[in-house]
Image (spheres, rainbow, N blue to C red):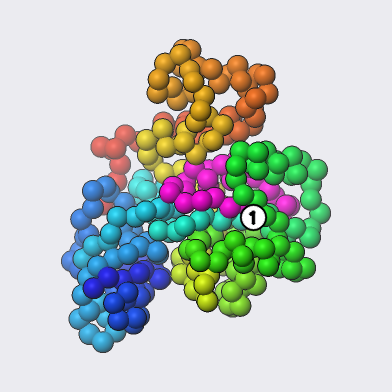
């Protein structure tokens, strides 16, 4: 039997059967699911799993199908990759203008953590005062080919347009705590997800979604993911990081396979100096690569 994972809490899953249309409470068969790579929490919301029911409402999962896409982060406590959402058609990265502050470097890391899905950048709380630097940042992302929309649950700005963009697709919503992600989803879907205020002491959001959740209504399907304060890009081939920066993909350097990280014959520093590549974006890219290099070698990491 095939299942779509709808919720994941402490290795207990809500699984929707694609065969009989029923919801099951599911667990992994045996203590560990064998996979080609070590990963924290081997089953993610959005995964297509296979297994068998053992009662009217319970099932055992024995494996998952290959993912067509995923949003994944680095779990710093376990030194392992952790997939937060899987098989989404689009990853919507939600930001706010000032509460919490708009952070382009966070957006860059979130984009680099999503693979195989279209990217949508959402500037939420658009009715708030917009700092002067943000329109230029938004224009930069648009010039790189990323879709951008401004929304406000308070005024309704952009909500109808956003619904149209979500129809017929599975979209994973990610973002910093406090950007209004849950409120935005409530507005779109007519749900009642728990929402929270921003902590004014640190101007950071309080976590209100503590596990990923698949929500479906009519022809819109959303994976709501827990809000975070930081995102660490998953430990992977740095070439994949380069691929998440459109302005670096087509650059031709003296040597094939250049990562644009200080190699001899690299053309990127000259393009940055001439203004053809944004200096802030390039610095963000270098910081991501450095964070990968600083991690423990594979043989020293905790693979339990």
Q: Quadrant of residue 296?
A: top left
* Residue closest to the eye, 12 or 264: 264
* Residue 173 position in % (x across, y down): 54, 60
Check if residue 99 falls in the magenta segment.
Answer: yes
What quarter of the picture does the N terminus occupy? bottom left
Residue at 42%, 44% in the rendered image:
234
Q: Magenta part of the protein: which range?
A: 95-122
Neighbor class of circle 1 (other Cα within 10 Å; few <14, some 14-19, many 20+) is: many
Residue at 74%, 39% in the rendered image:
136
Q: Quadrant of residue 157?
A: bottom right
Q: Is residue 205 visible?
A: no
Check if residue 192 falls in the magenta segment.
Answer: no
* Residue 280 position in % (x across, y down): 64, 31
Q: Please say if 241 is above or below 89.
A: above
Q: Is residue 58 visible?
A: yes
Residue at 52%, 76% in the rendered image:
218
* Left or right: where 51 falls relative to 114: left
* Residue 240 position in % (x across, y down): 42, 37
State the residue position of label 1. 122
* Residue closest to the eye, 26 or 40: 26
* Residue 180 position in % (x across, y down): 65, 63
Q: Please say if 146 is above or below 16.
A: above
Q: Dot 1 lies on which element? A: strand
Q: Residue furthest bottom?
A: 56
Residue at 43%, 22% in the rendered image:
258
């Amino acid at each position: 039997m095939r299942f779509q994972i709808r919720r994941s809490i402490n290795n207990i899953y809500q699984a929707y059967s694609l065969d009989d249309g029923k919801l099951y409470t599911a667990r992994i068969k045996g203590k560990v699911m064998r996979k080609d790579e070590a990963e924290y929490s081997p089953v993610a919301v959005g995964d297509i799993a296979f297994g068998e029911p053992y009662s009217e409402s319970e099932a055992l999962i024995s494996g998952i199908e290959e993912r067509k896409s995923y949003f994944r982060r680095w779990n710093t406590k376990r030194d392992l990759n952790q997939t937060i959402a899987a098989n989404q058609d689009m990853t919507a990265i939600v930001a706010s203008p000032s509460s919490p502050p708009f952070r382009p470097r966070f957006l860059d890391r979130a984009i680099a953590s999503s693979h195989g899905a279209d990217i949508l950048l959402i500037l939420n709380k658009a009715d708030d005062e917009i700092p002067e630097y943000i329109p230029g940042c938004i224009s930069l992302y648009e010039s790189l080919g990323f879709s951008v929309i401004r929304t406000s649950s308070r005024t309704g700005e952009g909500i109808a347009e956003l619904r149209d963009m979500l129809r017929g697709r599975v979209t994973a919503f990610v973002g910093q705590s406090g950007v209004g992600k849950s409120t935005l989803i409530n507005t779109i879907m007519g749900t009642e997800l728990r929402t929270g205020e921003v902590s004014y002491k640190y101007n950071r959001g309080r976590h209100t979604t503590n596990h990923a959740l698949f929500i479906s209504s009519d022809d819109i399907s959303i994976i709501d993911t827990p809000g975070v304060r930081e995102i660490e890009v998953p430990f992977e081939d740095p070439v994949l990081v380069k691929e998440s920066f459109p302005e670096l993909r087509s650059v031709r350097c003296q040597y094939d396979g250049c990562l644009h990280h200080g190699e001899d014959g690299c053309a990127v520093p000259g393009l940055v100096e001439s203004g053809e590549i944004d200096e802030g974006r390039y610095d963000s890219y270098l910081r991501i690569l450095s964070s990968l290099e600083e991690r423990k070698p594979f043989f020293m990491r905790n693979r339990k």
